[in-house]
Amino acid sequence: MYPRQIPETRPVARLAYAACVWIVLAVWLLPVFAIMLTALRTLEDVMAGNYWGWPDRINLWGNLVAVFTQTDMLRYFLNSLIITLPSTALVLILSTMTGYVLARHRFPGATLLFATFIAGNFMPQQVFMIPVRDLMVSLGLYDTFGALIIFHVAFQTGFATLFMRNFIAALPNELFQAARAEGASPGQVLVQIVVPLVRPALAALSILLFTFIWNDYFWAIVLTQTDAVKPVTAGLANLRGEWASSWNVISAATLFVAIPPVVMFFLMQRHFVAGLTMGAVKG
Amino acid sequence: MSDVKLTSVQKYYAAFHALRDIDLTIQPGEFVVMVGPSGCGKSTLLKSIAGLSDITSGRIEIAGRDVTRTDPGERGIAMVFQSYALYPHMSVAQNMGFGLKIMKRPRAEIDAAVRAAAEILRITDVLDKKPGQLSGGQRQRVAIGRAITRRPDVFLFDEPLSNLDAALRTQMRVELATLHKRLGATMIYVTHDQVEAMTMADRIVVLRAGRIEQVGAPLELYRNPVNHFVASFLGAPRMNFFEGRLRDLSAGATLEVPGLPEVTIPALAADHGLRPGNRVTLGLRPEHMRIDGRGVTTPATLRLAEELGRESVLYADAGALRTTGSDTGTESVTLLLGAGTPPPEGSTLQIGFDPADAYLFAEDGRTVTAPKSAP
Amino acid sequence: MLRTRRSLRHRATPALLLAPGLLLFLVVIVFSALRTFWISLHAWDGFGPMTWVGLSNYAELWGDPQFWVSLRNNVIWLAVFLLAPPMGLAIALLVNQKIRTMRLAKSLFFMPLVLSTVTVGVIFVWFYDPSYGLLALLFHAFGASPPAVLSSDTWVTFAVVFAALWPQVAFCMILFLAGLNTLDEEIIGAGRVDNARGWQMLRHIVLPQLRQVAFIALAISMIGALRSFDIIAVMTSGGPFGSSTNLAYQMYQESLFSYRFGYGAALATVLFAIMMVFIVWYLLRLLRDERSA
């Protein structure tokens, strides 16, 4: 391993090294601690400029109650789930199908298609903004969950297809030949061989997609208007305008918004890291 | 009726001519081994028979049916892959039953077929395991079992033993030969290992650069290779080749080879087409070389002796007598002697041979000596 | 070449599997990108009919000082984001030790990446708050008066970029950590036997093996810099007085606040063109690697 490992025989050095790392980490996460501490405070405490001191009174519960009762955050939170979960599921289905075809079937224009998926995936969102908004308006979907779901599914399918294609292309070729020799049709190969084998990739992909879609802000403000469909990111940004200096409440709401992706991350950390680095590191 | 018949099979990969005009008829129940150096097209040919690779032109028949454009699953074949290609997410039993399940056979029939195959291959106790939990030899058996359950007209094997260690390879070789006798099925087997070819085949097909060089029973190929390539490909240690020039054709072929006294090969093929002055290659199998001073001899220094117990392989430097294209990459002459203690390394020997044992190859590689009969 | 005789079902299946995802992508993504260019040649308020104006939106851009501010800010974003790969590598090297608690430390280093940009923006607004924020506290500690970085047209872009750098560094760190785990142990061993140490080891033995990862980290950072929008919207709304806009944000404002969709589309097209340079560079390398692999 590189860098050279500090040997087990030098426990003091190892302890000191770990301590250094944790100090760096503390600095790294300083902004997060600030938000966490602030979420514990009362408004008076914040206004008094008590930034790092221990809060006068732990008011996390009060702040959360304020978030739930005096703001629409709970509604936004549900909206985000309503948008994110079906979008993620749909992308997983579509990209498994497209990724499988791209990985296993040669056809003219495959490379061009591949390049289009990559390019589309890296484009600044603003490039699609006006036509997509116009399309949703003319379909009567503007300011509905449908608009956001359709856009997210279309956009993420590009990335997800690349992801699945790379994973499926790495499966041993002979496995597919064996299935063909046994008379399995392309559809049967997909259902009986590919899907069971790509489960790890689907797990990694689902957490990435969940995070990407949950965290979207741009399309939330471009394609929605009313609180009834606004996701939590747009809601949080609004909240900051409405509750200008009530940083204790804003902080509590911020933590609330961050909960699902952070929980997903810690539950499926291995998959998350594998997903992000898949393809990037081929040795 | 033949089980597999290939007629004028051609295949191109873009400009690369992978299979050149292949004609081959395989009889029912025959065990045919296709050998050749890597890139010779043997695997491509096998995959074409399986239908996993489309051919450019020609015709493939299996059990009397034209299957040239039939999907692999409907050709009546089963294939055993080099990497075994077991489905990692299925148990052994599911792997073996997958083909029948695709054919929508009743559950009871699948179970019975799996059980019967597992008993033949002695893997009944691992039926519920996943391939990842099996040893290499067990995986090999499962792969074969998967082929057996489909009851194919033809079994195709793509270098199936190359991932096994030497001991297991010998064991599986014997088992496969036994299985062939027991099932009586047609089997086509691709390998680059000439020991597998010699020991298992009813007939060997030697391929080079997409073309069939020779087809025949193992010993026939060994004894009467049609050309320089087949002669050099079969036999380990490899045949010694010496370049020379033809001097006279009045009685047999008299040739001069640098480092040897004049040699006269007694019997030539009827259509040898040689002329005095032609360049030729003299071929001598190592087991036909001797050190008893009889036959045509020349002095040589023993460079290295490999004692294998039952036999010894000697490498000798014979001055101006130089081999070309040897296994060892040197110009030494290789001798294979029977049991007994070889002379000490560094000693001087009289190496020699009986001209009747020698092969002669024309400049274009054709064998021009008369066919040799069984001893 | 003779095709094998497959039933129609067999041949049609791949096309059927490809169709839904592909159509959706083509209609919503590819067609939209092309249509943006078409709209940029028109004057349009987003509701009424479009009027053909040729290249005059682009001519107007050239003379628009706000456009040059946006472009300058895009360059600043790109330049600062160049720091992300080396910083990510540094942290990856720091935590790549098999010591207890290191796994947890790694996860916590990743954390900024999981947070939404809105969250990061809010966190940093609080961090930069001139009366109570952590930055203010630091300045007070040194006896200086704290600057209001988000209201300063000199500092605002840097303040925003540094906030955005935070998750980007985490991303690069993940990539490099994965890269460090695929290093060829034997080559590292050979380097150690040859007594390569410290910088030499990193420079001559380790970095060459991380080339692929470093390239991806760099490309993703550059593309990320050009795509930035959310954090500007959350932290400054482009202010003060448009001094922290970039092309993406200006485009959004021109379209949805000034109802100048044609002009907005022209900005988007310029952004598209700049991005294309990076994407083509990335794609060519990717394809080359794919071919050689």
Image (cartoon, coloured by chain):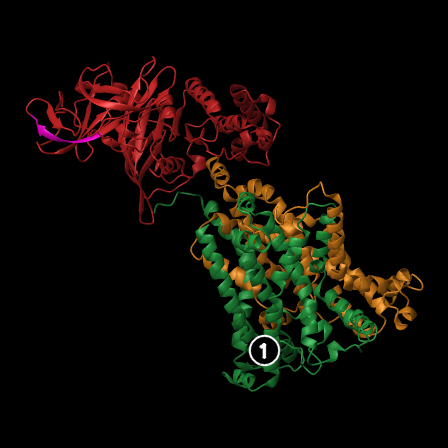
- Quadrant (top left/top right/bottom left/bottom right) for the C terminus of chain B: top left
Chain bearing tag 1 is: C
Give whichever of A152, B197 is nearer the camera.
B197
Position in image of residue C163 (x %, y %): 70, 68
| Farthest residue, direction right | A57
Position in image of residue A18 (x %, y %): 74, 50
Is B245 colored magenta in this rendering?
A: yes
Position in image of residue C12 (x %, y %): 48, 49
The residue at the point 73 percent across, 47 percent down is: A14
Give whichever of C173, A86 is nearer the camera.
C173
Left or right placement of residue A42 versus residue B256 in this view: right
Q: Which residue is mark 1?
A: C71
Position in image of residue C193 (x %, y %): 54, 44
The residue at the point 62 percent across, 44 percent down is: A199
**Chain C: drawing colour:** green
The image quarter containing residue A229 is bottom right
Q: Residues within 10 Å of mark 1 (few under 14, many from 20)?
A: some
Left or right placement of residue A150 versus residue A254 in this view: left
Left or right placement of residue B99 versus residue A130 in this view: left
**Chain A: drawing colour:** orange
Q: Which residues are magenta?
A: B242-249
Query: Is residue B181 among what the camera can see?
Result: yes
| Farthest residue, direction top | B340
Q: Is residue C164 above or below residue A182?
A: below
Q: Is residue B159 above or below residue A18?
A: above
**Chain B: drawing colour:** red
Is B254 colored magenta in this rendering?
A: no
Magenta region, mostly helix, strand or loop?
Answer: strand
Query: Three-letter amino acid code at disc 1?
Result: Leu
